[in-house]
Amino acid sequence: MKTAPHTSECDLRRDLRSTLRTGIRAAETVGKRLVSLGTPLTASDAAANCERGRTFETVYGSGGQSAKNCAGTHIHFERARNVIGPRIERLDRRTEQ
């Protein structure tokens, strides 16, 4: 998801929620679901060999693509220094480690 620049965390959260709801509705119209597992990088259908994999198959069925090798789910923040405020600066320093 990509949003326009925001001046407050509240506005960013509102925009992200709205975009996520739109994505969920779009998926539902074609009989799909959004799953927060990241993007599979391979199309292999390796057998589940861990508790997480077995849980995935229990919940979504054995027809799901392997999500062991995935890009992940993450957020990138673009911002100009000192524009948003010290709270966001601290968050940025913690996530850059």
Image: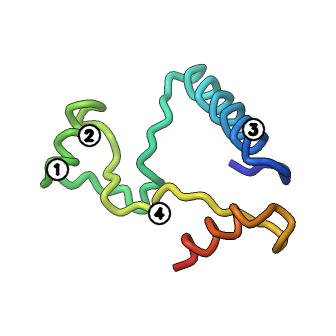
Read off the residue under disc 1.
48
The local crowd at label 1, few if under 14, some if 14 to 19, many if 20 or more residues have their Cα within 10 Å, is some
Q: Amino acid at mark 4?
A: Ala
Q: Are marks 1 and 2 in contact (CB under 8 Å)?
A: yes
- The circle drawn on residue 71 is 4
As measured in the structure, the alpha-carbon distance from the residue carrying label 1 to the one carrying label 2 is 9 Å
Which mark's residue is nearer the viewer, 3 or 4?
Answer: 3
Of tags 2 and 3, the one toward the viewer is 3
Q: Is 26 drawn above or below residue 80 in the view shown?
A: above
Residue in the image at 68% along x and 48% along y: 1
Mark 4 secondary-structure assignment: loop
Q: Position of residue 74 (x, y in %)?
A: 54, 58
Disc 4/disc 2 C-alpha distance (Å): 17 Å
Q: Residues within 10 Å of mark 4 (few under 14, many from 20)?
A: few
Considering depth in this image, is 58 or 82 the residue closer to the camera?
A: 82
Q: Which residue is mark 2?
A: 56
Q: Quadrant of residue 36?
A: top left
Q: Which residue is mark 3?
A: 15
